[in-house]
């Protein structure tokens, strides 16, 4: 399942921020419900990792490591918290791999389609994530992003 803002934007997977009050998997489950209106069970084993740029509140960009988890879908809702903001679309993995703009996610999805192992990503030299955790996103996969906002 991929999501896109109704007013445009690129296709993406549902994303959750790591929270000190919830585990990464629980955050992923919540994101799947709130962002995509899907219920299910998030896999504890990640599908893979990739590095992505994330915008900080001050406008600068930092590289963050994203952990992607699968979701065994139990059901989809006709109405959910973000249904007026996003469109959701079920896609075959090969279609999803060419639909996303984020190169790290595209490579990860392509590796799942081809059955090849994706090389463990490395953060660019001199860069480090300002938040690391098991935050996960669900849908076809899930993504670990930022914990709390870090100073610029």
Image (cartoon, rainbow, N blue to C red):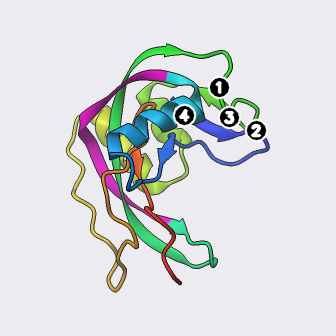
Q: Is mark 3 on a helix, strand or loop?
A: loop
Q: How crowded is mark 4: few (under 14 residues within 10 Å), some or many (20 or more)?
A: many
Q: Which residue is drawn at 42% across and 31% down?
A: 140
Magenta stretch prevailing secondary structure: strand
- The label on residue 6 is 2
Residue behind mark 3: 82
Q: Does residue 40 belong to the magenta stretch?
A: yes
Q: Nearer the viewer, mark 2 or mark 1?
A: 1
Residue behind mark 1: 80
Q: Distance between the residues labelled 2 and 3?
A: 11 Å
Q: Does residue 71 belong to the magenta stretch?
A: no
Q: How crowded is mark 3: few (under 14 residues within 10 Å), some or many (20 or more)?
A: some
Residue behind mark 4: 2
Q: How far apart are marks 2 and 1 (CA)?
A: 15 Å
x and y percentages locating residue 89 in the rendered image:
60, 26
Q: Give yes or no for contact between labels 1 and 3 (Cβ–Cβ under 8 Å).
A: yes
């Amino acid at each position: 399942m991929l999501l896109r803002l109704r007013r445009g934007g690129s296709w993406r997977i549902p994303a959750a921020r790591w929270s000190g009050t919830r585990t990464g998997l629980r955050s992923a489950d919540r994101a799947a419900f709130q962002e995509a209106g899907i219920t299910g069970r998030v896999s504890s084993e990640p599908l893979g990792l990739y590095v992505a740029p994330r915008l900080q509140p001050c406008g600068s960009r930092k590289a963050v490591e994203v952990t992607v988890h699968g979701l065994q879908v139990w059901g989809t809702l006709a109405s959910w918290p973000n249904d007026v903001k996003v469109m959701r679309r079920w896609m075959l993995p090969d279609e999803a791999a060419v639909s996303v703009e984020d190169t790290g996610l595209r490579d990860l999805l392509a590796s799942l389609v081809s059955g090849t192992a994706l090389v463990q990503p490395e953060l660019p030299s001199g860069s480090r994530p300002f938040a690391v955790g098991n935050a996960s996103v669900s849908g076809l996969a899930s993504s670990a992003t930022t914990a709390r906002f870090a100073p610029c």
